[in-house]
Structure formats: structure tokens, C-alpha cells
Image (cartoon, helix red, strand yellow):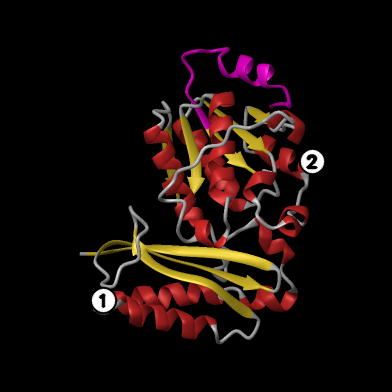
Amino acid sequence: MIVSEIISEIRHKRWEDKSASWGLVPTMGSLHEGHLSLVRQAREENNRVAASIFVNPIQFNRKNDYDSYPTNLASDLELLEREGVDLVWTPQKSLVYPEIFQTYIDVTQLSKVLEGAARPGHFQGVTTIVAILFNVFQPTRAYFGQKDAQQEAVIRRMVEDLHFNIEIRSCPTVREKDGLAMSSRNANLTKKARAAAPVLFRALNLAKVAIEKGEISSKNIYQLLKNEIEKSECAQIDYISIADQKTLNEIKIIAGNVLISLAVFWDEVRLIDNIRISNK
């Protein structure tokens, strides 16, 4: 496995064999089974696999969230090598964003709602770093987890609008045994919050069951989710959304392809989760 901070070295390795297909897994490090599932999917579908490890400062809208983001580069590299990754970019912040940096990418509509409304500037940071990664690696395919459903939608829009010659691959959310979606931020939960946090997935499943039984009122599903989450004393709801999967616009009647998503604070730790439902 080649590990480098230098862009020219990354590009040289990537184009060493022009016939080889490459799968890219962008990460901010602190790797867990969710990241590794993306790596395995990339390995199945490509001749070579690349990954990036970079905690992107411009996608954080709270400095303490950026400062507290867990990092362990040595462990991350060991995990990636064990999974057969061929190439890893580990750039310094000053390389990615030099003092003269002034170019940002903004997906204007899809970025306004949900995470975009709750975290102003977040998706501009995401699309900018992903575009940089796509330019550095020039992969055949790039892999993202469904836990970040809005991120996937925003990146797909950027890829289509800017004509990137890259296939975006979506992979299922990986969960702990108790249903909590795997996230690097889980490590920052207190013991009490960690024990309570699986309520997010339980609430989403309750919503799914209610819809399968015939409930089509978004208002009723919203209240069901809210009531279940608020059973946990330490949970503070940021938002609950019931929206069209493609446009992310909120809907009143549950029909078609629906994304039910939520964000909840546990003290200073903010977790997100979602389910996708097809209700014809």
C-alpha cells in the first residue's frame, strides 16, 4: 500500500496502468466497519482501490466539533492495508487549502434544507473537498454510505451538473448490534448517551412499520418519531424530516420514494440517521 501526501505521487500511481479501474473511498479517518464496508465494495467492483484520510475543516460549522473530531492515522492505515487498499492520500491542510485558496463549489438547492439548514456552509465544504478528491484521484467510481443520504444526493447533483466522469456508488448503512448507525462521532458519546442512542433506529423502524400498515400522514409519522425519541431524557431533536428522496422537499402525504431522516444531539454530540421507504 502506497501512502503519500504528494498529489503528483498519487496521480502517478493512479495512471501507472491506464487500463485499471479505480474505486475511491473518501474518509475523514477514525475508520470503522462502515468505512471498511465501502472499501470492500470498491474492491469487488474495481481493479484498484484508493482512499483519502483528511479531516476537512471547511465542512464544520462548529469549531469545537472540528477540534474534537477523533483521529488515529496509524490505526486507520493499518486497517486500510489489511483490506488491500492500494493507495492512500493523507494531505496536510496547507496543501488542500493554501492561504490563497478561494474556489468553492455550491450545489444551491439541495444544500439548503436538512443538514444544510442546520449547518450553514456544510455542504459547500463537502462538495469542494469531494471535487478536489475527484480531481486528484480521477477514480472510475466513488463510494459513499447511505447514512449520509443528503450528502449522497448533493454529490450526485454536483457530478451530473459538472460532468465528472465518475460513477457514484451508494452502500447500505452499517449498524452496531443494537441498531445505532456506525459513526466516528459515536466515540465521543458518554456512556449514558451511547446506551440511549439506539432509540434513533428504533424510532425509524416504528415509522416504517406504521407506513407499511397504511399510515400516509407525514404529520402522524413525525409525531410518532418525536414521541419515541423524546422518551430518552438526554436526546435533543435538531430536526425530523419526511421528504421526497430526489428533491428533499418535505411532503404531507407519504407516497413514492420517501426519505425519513433525523438529527439529534446527545449533549455536544450530534448524530444523524435515516431510512428510505418506497410507498407506492
Structural distance between the alpha carbons of marks 2 and 1: 49 Å
Residue shown at 63%/66% (left/top)? 270
Assign a secondary structure to mark 2. Answer: helix
Give the crowd class for mark 2: few <14, some 14-19, many >=20 residues within 10 Å. Answer: few
Which portion, as a residue range, is magenta?
1-23
Q: Nearer the viewer, residue 229 or 117?
A: 117
Q: Which of the labelled discs sits on residue 74, or is there none?
A: 2
Q: Which of the labelled discs sits on residue 216, or is there none?
A: 1
Q: Position of residue 273 (x, y in %)?
A: 51, 64
Q: Could one spot residue 74 in this view of the protein?
A: yes
Which quadrant, please, contains the N terminus? top right
Tell me the mark number nearer the camera, choosing from 2 and 1. Answer: 1
Which quadrant, please, contains the C terminus? bottom left
Q: Position of residue 130 (x, y in %)?
A: 55, 37
Residue 65 in the image: above or below residue 232: above
Q: At label 2, which amino acid type do we have?
A: Ala
Assign a secondary structure to mark 1. Answer: loop
Residue 187 in the magenta stretch? The answer is: no
Q: At label 1, which amino acid type do we have?
A: Ile
Label 2 with label 1: CB-CB less than 8 Å: no
Residue 2 in the magenta stretch? The answer is: yes
- The mark that comes first in sequence, 2 or 1, is 2
